[in-house]
Image (cartoon, rainbow, N blue to C red):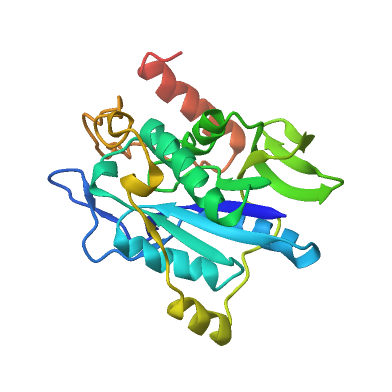
Amino acid sequence: MNILVCVKQVPDTTEIKINPETNTLIREGVPSIVNTFDAFALEMAARIKDTQDAKIVVMSMGPDQAKKALKECLAVGADKAYLVSDRAFSGSDTLATGYILSEAMKAVEAQEGPFDIIFCGKQAIDGDTAQTGPQLAEHLDYPQITCISDITVEDAKIRATRETEYGKEIWESSMPVLVTVTKPPYEPRYPTIKTKMAANKAEIPVLTIAEVKADPEKSGLKGSPTRVKKTYVPVLNKNGIIIKEEMAADSAKKLAGLLSDAGLV
C-alpha cells in the first residue's frame, strides 16, 4: 500500500503575540512546527503501516526551512519526503495550493508509484480554512471523506469514522481516496534517537515548478483569487457584573431590575 501525507509547517500558535498597533501577528522569534492536524494524519497513516505492508511518503509546499518539518515526519514513521518549493508558488491561496499539490503528487507518483490513500489534516492552525484537502481531492477527482477520527483498511477499502456536530458516522470508500483528519483518540508517537539521527541525514528532493509542471497562471498570486484585505484582533469589552445575593430569589429580582432599567425587558 502506498500512502501520501500532506503536511504544512506553521507558526506555533501558542507562542504567537499580536502587535497592538498594527493588529498583525508577530512572527519573529516564533518557532515553527508541523501543523497539529497534519501530525494526527501522519500518526493515523503510521498505524496503518504498523499492521500492513505500507510505505508512507510525506509532501510539503513551502520555503526551504520546511525541510525541518519533513525531517520530523521522517523521524516518526514516514519513509520518504518531498518539498514542493519555488518562488512562483509564493502567495498561493488555498485554490492555487490545491492545484499545485495535485500536480506535485503526480510528479511524486512517477517516482514512488500510485497512492492508495492521501491524508491531509482537516485544516492548518494558522489559516483555519479547511479548504486545501477538499480542493486537492477535487483536482484529483478522488472521493473524499472529511474530518475523520479513525480509519481501518480491509479488502481494498477504507472504513472511516467521521466526526460531525450530531455525533459519529461510519463511511466506506474504495481506493484511491483522500481523507482529512481531525483529532483522533490517541496522540502522535515520539521519535527515538535512532530515527531522529536517520531523519537528519536524509536528503529531501525539492520539486520546483519545472518538475511539478504546474501552470504559472494557476500558481502563486496569479492563480489566487483570494485577497486578505485586513486582519485584526476583536476588542473584548469586559463590562459584565456578578450578582450574588444571599438568596437566589433576591439575585433574580436584582437581575430583573437591572434589565428593566436598561430597557432590555
Instruction: Inspect this view and state whether residue 13 appears.
Output: no
Task: Give the residue displayed 64% in from the left and 41% down from the top.
Answer: 179
Report the label total. 0
Q: Give how far across and how far down residue 83 sits, in percent.
A: 40, 57
Q: On the picture, is 122 further left or further right than 205?
A: right
Residue 4 position in % (x across, y down): 59, 52
Residue at figure coordinates x 51%, y 51% from the top left: 108
- In the image, is 106 to the left or to the right of 83? right
Please tell me in which quadrant of the rendered image residue 30 appears. Answer: bottom left
Image coords of residue 23 (percent x, y): 20, 43
Which quarter of the figure is the N terminus placed in?
A: bottom right
Kindly tell me whether residue 64 is visible in this rendering: yes
Q: From what the image shows, is residue 125 above or below residue 250?
A: below
Q: Is residue 180 above or below residue 224?
A: below
- Tell me which residue sits at (54%, 28%) in the image: 138
Residue drawn where x is 38% and y is 55% of the image:
10
Q: Is residue 255 above or below residue 174?
A: above
- Vertical arrangement, residue 161 with respect to residue 72, above or below: above
The reply, left or right, for residue 141 in relation to residue 169 is left
- The spot of residue 133 in percent (x, y) is 52, 38
Q: Quadrant of residue 171?
A: top right
Query: Which of 114 and 202 lies nearest the eye of the viewer?
Result: 114
Determine which quarter of the picture holds residue 97.
top left
Residue at the far left: name it.
Answer: 21
